[in-house]
Amino acid sequence: MSRIPYHFPGITVIVPDQKTEVELIVREKAIPKEIPLNTSDFEVIRIVANVVAYEKREMSEPIMAFDPPIEIRVGYNMMDVMQSGCELENLKLAYWDGRDWVIISDSDHEYMILPPSTCQIAEVKINKWAGDPPIGWGR
């Protein structure tokens, strides 16, 4: 199985060959201005990127389900940690689904935030999400 990495500032998306044999391509889009930075259970510290996966041949509708899952690696910095109360456990990774911030957790995905002594990234495997979700750090 081959895996293709797509690198953007602050985020890498790794796409393995899909079982459907659809060839995916990942692009970065502008971050929409109308996204709220505060919801009832999430406060955005920093939006990292707005990425979207398309079928390479058509590039019309975003692909929202992945089999096998795609992997994303999202960088955080010490300002993100400081704004989350100086506690790494308080730092949350989330994506905007068009209505709400969906917090990525290890109960829903394979998710791990690596400590600053190792490297400052979170790794997650995602098998489905909103069409072109902005991804951000928050608390």
Image (cartoon, rainbow, N blue to C red):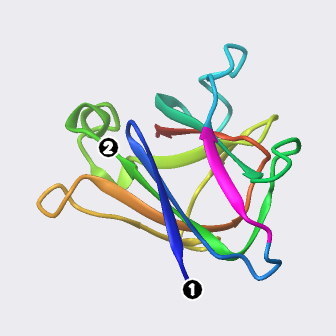
Magenta run includes residue 50: no
* Residue hosting label 1: 1
Q: Is residue 51 left or right of residue 79?
A: right
Given the image, on which type of amino acid does mark 2 rest?
Tyr
- Identify the element where label 2 is drawn: loop
- The alpha-carbon separation of the residues under discs 2 and 1 comes to 29 Å
- Tell me the residue at 72%/76% (across/down): 18
In the image, 76 versus 42, the foreground residue is 76
- Give the magenta range: 22-27
Q: Main secondary structure of the magenta part?
A: strand
Q: Is residue 8 left or right of residue 76?
A: right
Q: Work out whether mark 2 precedes mark 1 in sequence or the reverse, and give the earlier one.
A: 1
In this picture, is 51 found above or below 120? above
In the image, 68 versus 105, the foreground residue is 68
In the image, 9 versus 107, the foreground residue is 9
In this picture, is 98 found above or below 5? above
Given the image, on which type of amino acid does mark 1 rest?
Met
